[in-house]
Amino acid sequence: MRPEHAAAVLAIYQLGIDERNATFETTAPTWQAFDTAKLPDHRLVALDEEGRVLGWAAVVPVSDRCAYAGVVEHSVYVHPDARGRRVGLALLTALIASTEAAGIWTIQSGVFPENTASLALHQRAGFRVIGTRERIGRHGGTWRDVVLLERRSPAVD
């Protein structure tokens, strides 16, 4: 992911936000805020033959405590027109390779239970359900649950 992908990445993020089953966020951040928050070595885009961004994946550290240095939380978003084409699986597969090469042993995320496509994608990519945080936050005035997912690397000791 490079700065020239910024507009497309943020537009895809906003499309996911607008569907109301991807995140508690209500608006995509600025590129500066996005760029600052995401770990630079683990930000990926999927491009079509013409170089258009089809989707993206990125991670943030879960904590600044040294004990959690090998644990990240990820996001993966695919443009609605590119869904069903294994873009998400390609992004997650590449993200797993990238994080494992850096010694990251756990990738985690939270997914709304209504986002069945994301839950299925994560299962295909080797994530497991840890549990459900019930009524963890309000979204548009409604309490929402979040399914906790993680993937532990068998390659990182």
Image (cartoon, rainbow, N blue to C red):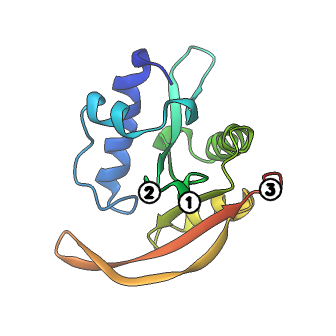
Which residue is more in the foreground, 83 or 88? 88
* Spot occupied by residue 15 in the image (x, y as percentages of width and height): 35, 44
| C-beta proximity under 8 Å, tags 2 and 1 | yes
Residue drawn at the location 61% of the way across and 45% of the way down: 88
The nearer-to-camera label among 1 and 3 is 1
The mark that comes first in sequence, 2 or 3, is 2
**Of the image marks 1 and 3, the number of the one nearer the N terminus:** 1
Q: How packed is label 3: few (under 14 Cα within 10 Å), some, or many (20 or more)?
A: few
What residue is shown at x 44% (from left), y 70% (from top)?
112
Q: CA distance from mark 1 to mark 3?
A: 14 Å
| Residue 41: percent from left, percent from top | 56, 30
Residue picked out by circle 1: 67
Q: Is residue 57 left or right of residue 16?
A: right
Q: Quadrant of residue 129?
A: bottom right
Q: From the viewer's perspective, is residue 89 above or below residue 19?
A: above
Label 1: state its secondary structure.
helix
Alpha-carbon distance for marks 2 and 3? Answer: 20 Å
Q: Position of residue 18 (x, y in %)?
A: 29, 52
Count the marks: 3
Label 3, on which residue? 157
> Which amino acid type corresponds to the residue marked 1 in the rendered image?
Ala
Q: Which quadrant is home to the C terminus?
A: bottom right
Give the numbered dot on residue 63. Answer: 2
Label 2 – label 1 distance at C-alpha? 9 Å
Q: Counting other residues with Cα less than 10 Å from the Cα at mark 1, is it few (<14), some (14-19), or many (20 or more)?
A: few
Could you tell me the amino acid type at mark 3?
Answer: Asp
Identify the residue at image location x=39%, y=27%.
Answer: 8
Residue type beneath disc 2: Ser
